[in-house]
């Protein structure tokens, strides 16, 4: 499974939440998601979603939402 597929729910949620400067890149087996959340509440919701998806896997994603 490609990492963008695995984390598609998180990426879609970030887009729907209007995360600005959203960048999603994959390199060397690591998916990097960067952006600026419009509020702390949005950031926390994305972090919760990330933790739910990522709970049992290796370190295959870097989530940098400020």
Image (cartoon, rainbow, N blue to C red):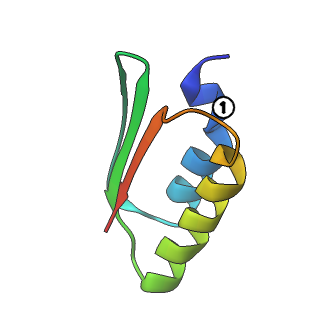
Task: Give the residue number, with chain letter if any, for mark 1.
Answer: 6
The answer to whether 14 is drawn above or below residue 5 in the figure is below
Numbered circles on residues, count: 1
Residue 35's x, y, as percent? 32, 57
Left or right, residue 49 beside residue 27:
right
Residue pictured at 56% horizontal, 64% vertical: 46
Depth check, front residue: 11 or 56: 56
Left or right, residue 9 beside residue 29:
right
Residue pictured at 43% horizontal, 31% vertical: 31
The answer to whether 53 is drawn above or below residue 39 in the figure is above
The answer to whether 19 is drawn above or below residue 53 in the figure is below
Residue 33's x, y, as percent? 39, 45
The N terminus - image quarter: top right
Crowd class of label 1 (few under 14; some 14 to 19; many from 20; radius 10 Å)? few
Residue pictured at 60% horizontal, 18% vertical: 2
Residue 54's x, y, as percent? 64, 45
The C terminus - image quarter: bottom left
Residue 45's x, y, as percent? 60, 72
Residue pictured at 68% horizontal, 49% vertical: 55
- Quadrant in the picture for residue 3: top right
Q: Secondary structure at mark 1?
A: helix
């Amino acid at each position: 499974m490609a990492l963008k597929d695995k984390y598609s729910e998180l990426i879609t949620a970030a887009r729907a939440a209007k995360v600005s400067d959203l960048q999603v890149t994959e390199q060397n087996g690591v998916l990097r998601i960067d952006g600026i959340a419009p509020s702390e509440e949005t950031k926390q919701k994305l972090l919760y979603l990330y933790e739910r998806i990522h709970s049992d896997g290796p370190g295959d994603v870097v989530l940098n939402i400020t």
